[in-house]
Image (cartoon, grey):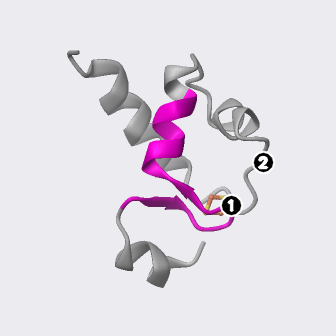
């Protein structure tokens, strides 16, 4: 996790894989809500694992979003 980069861009979720909020939301729309599966949809794997909470927050918000 590169905290400095993440601070500069709050939409950057995973600095190990350069995954942005929109990428996580795409995976959720694809039906994934599990951390590892969300990465797998993008053809990636978590590395340091420090973004797990941020990913979880996006999942929570997305699942409760009224569309
Ligand atoms: S920031 Fe390291 S795996 Fe996501």
- Point out the image quarter for the N terminus: bottom right
Q: Quadrant of ligand 1?
A: bottom right
Q: Which numbered circle lies on residue 50?
A: none
Q: Which numbered circle lies on residue 17?
A: 1
The quadrant where residue 59 appears: top left
Instruction: Kindly check if marks 1 and 2 are in contact, taking CB atoms under 8 A apart as contact.
Output: yes
The reply to whether the residue tagged 1 has its Cβ within 8 angstroms of ligand 1 is yes
Q: Is residue 62 left or right of residue 3?
A: left
Q: Position of residue 32 (x, y in %)?
A: 60, 22
**Residue 24 in the image: above or below residue 7:** above
Residue at figure coordinates x 25%, y 22% from the top left: 65
Q: Residues within 10 Å of mark 1 (few under 14, many from 20)?
A: some
| Residue toward you, 10 or 26 | 26
Question: Which range of residues does the magenta coloring cover?
Answer: 11-27
**Residue 62 in the image: above or below residue 42:** above
Q: Position of residue 6 (x, y in %)?
A: 44, 72
**In whole angstroms, how far apart are the C-alphas of marks 1 and 2?**
8 Å
Q: Position of residue 49 (x, y in %)?
A: 66, 56
Q: Is mark 1 on a helix, strand or loop?
A: loop
| Residue at which label 2 appears | 45
| Residue toward you, 3 or 42 | 42
């Amino acid at each position: 996790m590169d905290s400095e980069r993440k601070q500069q861009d709050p939409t950057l979720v995973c600095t190990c894989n350069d995954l942005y909020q929109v990428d996580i939301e795409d995976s959720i729309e694809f039906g994934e809500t599990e951390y590892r599966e969300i990465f797998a949809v993008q053809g990636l794997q978590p590395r340091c694992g420090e973004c797990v909470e941020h990913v979880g927050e996006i999942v929570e918000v997305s699942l409760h979003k009224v569309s």
